[in-house]
Image: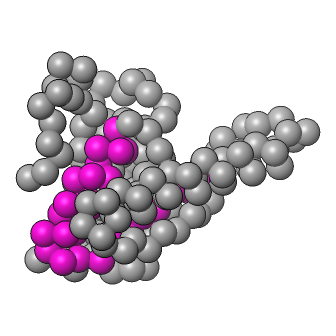
């Protein structure tokens, strides 16, 4: 049913739970797992020009760390390998483009990313991916503190 799972991550707590769920899904279906981090070009454009290069380096380093977390989770969970990719651009657009490039069967993402609780139901990136992605999107919500104790993040 699922041959390729794309895991969109931004390193946030919400994305972390989505990573664990997506890796479990990939393991259950013996699917290829791809982890993607997108450096938001809008954030870069909004930064002062004098610090833009340093800011870009910092965002790329954060992306590298987020992807390393996915690799460690995959190794600990089932010893699966994960293909990683770091892109720059509009996050939703890049996630959708990457899903098309790798012929994904599903995209997994957290419901709220590093920009926090500004949206009532879905973060703006997750919402755009859900609305525009040509393949199913698994959105994984962040748990409340009282729910975390019993969460096993397995189906």
- Quarter where residue 108 is shown: bottom left
Is residue 104 in sight in this rendering? no
Which of these two is toward me, 131 or 63? 63
Colouring method of the image: one colour
Number of numbered tags placed on the structure image: 0
Is 29 colored magenta in this rendering?
yes
Provide residue 115's location: percent of width, then percent of height: 49, 31
Which of these two is toward me, 61 or 72? 72
Is 42 colored magenta in this rendering?
no
154 sits to left or right of 102: left
Is residue 16 in sight in this rendering? yes
* x 48%, y 35%: residue: 114
User: Which quarter shows the N terminus?
Assistant: bottom left
* x 81%, y 45%: residue: 54
84 sits to left or right of 127: right
* x 13%, y 69%: residue: 28
63 sits to left or right of 57: left
Provide residue 27's location: percent of width, then percent of height: 19, 69
Provide residue 7's location: percent of width, then percent of height: 36, 60
45 sits to left or right of 81: right
- Quarter where residue 137 is shown: bottom left
* x 37%, y 74%: residue: 81
Q: What stretch of residues is rendered in magenta?
A: 14-41
Provide residue 145's location: percent of width, then percent of height: 24, 20
């Amino acid at each position: 049913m699922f041959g390729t799972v794309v895991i969109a991550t931004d390193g946030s707590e919400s994305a972390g739970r989505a990573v664990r769920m997506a890796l479990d899904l990939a393991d259950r279906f013996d699917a290829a797992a791809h982890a993607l981090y997108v450096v938001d070009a809008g954030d870069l454009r909004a930064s002062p020009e004098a610090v833009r290069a340093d800011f870009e380096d910092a965002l790329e380093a954060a992306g590298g760390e987020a992807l390393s977390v996915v690799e460690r989770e995959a190794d600990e969970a089932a010893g699966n390998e994960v293909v990683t990719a770091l892109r720059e651009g509009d996050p939703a657009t890049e996630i959708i483009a990457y899903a098309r490039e790798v012929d994904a069967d599903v995209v997994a993402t957290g419901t709220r990313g590093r920009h926090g609780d500004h949206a009532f139901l879905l973060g703006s990136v997750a919402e755009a991916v859900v609305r525009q992605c040509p393949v199913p999107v698994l959105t994984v919500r962040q748990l409340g503190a009282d729910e975390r104790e019993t969460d096993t993040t397995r189906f």
